[in-house]
Image: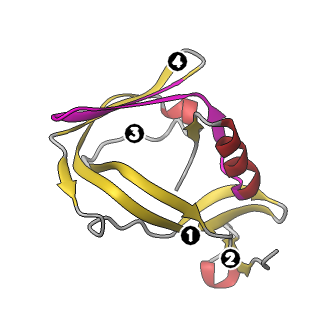
Amino acid sequence: MLVGAVVDAEAARRGLAERFGFRTFAGEVELARAYDATRLRVVRNGSVWLSLAIRAPQRLGGTDTQFVSSLHPAQTPRGFRLVQVDVEHAVHRAERGPIEIESFDAAAFGEARIRPSYPLPGVVGRADVSIRPIRYVCRADVLAFEGTESVAAG
């Protein structure tokens, strides 16, 4: 679930916000790759929102990565909904390794209650990404069986 995202390309940021209802912020996203680690730093208005490293990255094959559809909270013309986002990826290069979080400002992203506590692997790479048209949204106040709504193509 996406709570907030910093995007360094204004057209992409606007598109994600306007077409998909994502909570986006303009800022700087710095990715530095080296043989022993990949570092990510996210900065907005001079404040570091996120700094992390993926240590000892291991090369993956293009078909070894899988990204699944996901639900994201968004304000829509129908009101607040969970939006199903289907994404296609053509992965050209990918690496995986353990994440070491150096700093994380959960409140800046929009949810101060987030506390990273379980070690997870990170994946970094190069890919062509296509976000498919939205097909379904779901009311968050009822069970998915009752609250799933089809979105007409258009």
| Residue bounds of the magenta highlight | 20-43
Q: Which residue is mark 2?
A: 135
Place of residue 34 in the rendered image (x, y in percent of width and height, measured from the top left): 22, 32
Marks 1/2: CA–CA distance: 9 Å
Q: Say whether residue 113 is left or right of residue 118.
A: right
Kindly identify the amino acid type of the residue bearing the numbered disc 2: Arg
Q: Which residue is mark 4?
A: 47
Q: Looking at the image, do the residues carrying marks 4 and 1 touch, with CB atoms under 8 Å apart?
A: no
Kindly identify the amino acid type of the residue bearing the numbered disc 4: Ser
Place of residue 32 in the rendered image (x, y in percent of width and height, measured from the top left): 33, 30
**Which numbered disc flags the more N-terminal residue, 1 or 2?**
1
Q: Quadrant of residue 45?
A: top right
**Which numbered disc flags the more N-terminal residue, 4 or 1?**
4
The kind of secondary structure element at disc 1 is loop
Kindly identify the amino acid type of the residue bearing the numbered disc 3: Arg
Q: Which residue is mark 1?
A: 86
Around disc 1, counting alpha carbons within 10 Å, would you say few (fewer than 14), some (14 to 19), or many (20 or more)?
some
**Which numbered disc flags the more N-terminal residue, 3 or 1?**
1
Question: Of helix, strand and loop, which mostly describes the magenta segment?
Answer: strand
Around disc 4, counting alpha carbons within 10 Å, would you say few (fewer than 14), some (14 to 19), or many (20 or more)?
few
Which quadrant is home to the C terminus? bottom right
Marks 3/1: CA–CA distance: 27 Å
Q: Residue at x 40, y 39 (%)?
A: 115
Place of residue 139 in the rendered image (x, y in percent of width and height, measured from the top left): 70, 70
Q: Looking at the image, do the residues carrying marks 1 and 2 touch, with CB atoms under 8 Å apart?
A: yes
Marks 4/2: CA–CA distance: 37 Å
Q: Residue at x 76, y 51 (%)?
A: 18
